[in-house]
Amino acid sequence: MQKHQNFFHLHLISDATGETLLAAGRAASAQYKDARAIEHIYPLIRTEKQLSAVLDEIDDEPGIVLYTIVDQHLAALIDEKCAAMGLPCVSVLEPVLTVFQSYLGTPAGRRVGAQHALDAEYFRRIDALNFTMEHDDGQLPSDIEEADVVLVGISRTSKTPTSIYMANRGIKTANVPVVLGVPVPEILFSAKTPLIVGLIASAERISQIRQNRLLGTGSGFFDANAYTDRGTIAEELAYARQICTRHGWPVIDVTRRSIEETAAAILALLARSR
């Protein structure tokens, strides 16, 4: 018998984009499989007037409050109001800043949105994202040498979403499809700069994903039966493995991995290869 899922309100208050809070809130919420968070995100909260409106909304729909507010006056208001409403609230950054201050011996500068500064790192990520989008699904193979990472694999092994995630980390990532019986671009065999990684998954998992894709897009443009047939998929995977083994490319099984976990494994390989 399936357990009844409980819902709770999760209020996320940030003086920047709220990305840090959202990641922290979702990581914590994921530990409670029988409880689902109804997320309320309040980005760019930098004045008392803005905060007052937020606190009124929280009062209407009480729940857990997480915040990343560097202005200590506003942070104190949140603590005070939440205490008055009897609601738990946590400053997500404050414990981390305390550790940094203790170790470095100097207080934090408390600059709002400092992690989003338009510095060299920011533009490196934008450059990587542009490169990755231009080199999706085997496009522009002639300049593959400019990539940091090249992902190869059969259809539905999460090459594109993994590439985009890597690009957001500043890693120029190209991806090349492996099609049964079709040679991959010769330039991959002579490439010296990029780390080339093969992505595979179980035939059952790929079949499920492909079936879902067909349901969403229709199946009039190719042989749908062959596309989802597990026997055919097993042949495709064997062909992909053979190519990777022949050229000494590492292989990652993404069957039970999230995009983030796959990217972490690739980054670990990249660090060892440099």
Image: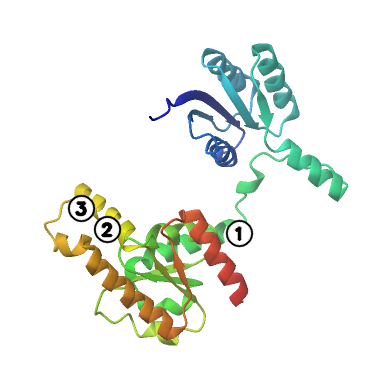
Check residue 252 in the rendering and tell me which mark sits there, or answer none. none
Element on which disc 2 rests: helix
Q: Position of residue 102 (x, y in %)?
A: 86, 44
- Mark with earlier residue (2, 1): 1
Residue that extends furthest to the right in the rendered view of this protein = 105
Q: Which residue is mark 1?
A: 121
| Residue 161 falls in image quadrant | bottom left
Q: Which residue is mark 3?
A: 214
Q: Are marks 2 and 3 in contact (CB under 8 Å)?
A: no
Q: Is residue 170 visible?
A: no
At label 2, the amino acid type is Ser
Q: Residues within 10 Å of mark 1 (few under 14, many from 20)?
A: few
Q: Which residue is mark 2?
A: 207
In this rendering, position of residue 217 left or right of residue 190: left
- Mark with earlier residue (3, 1): 1
Vertical order, 159 against 56 (above or below): below
Separation of residues labelled 3 and 1 (CA atoms): 39 Å
Between residue 211 and residue 11, name the one nearer to us.
Answer: 211
In this rendering, position of residue 197 left or right of residue 233: right
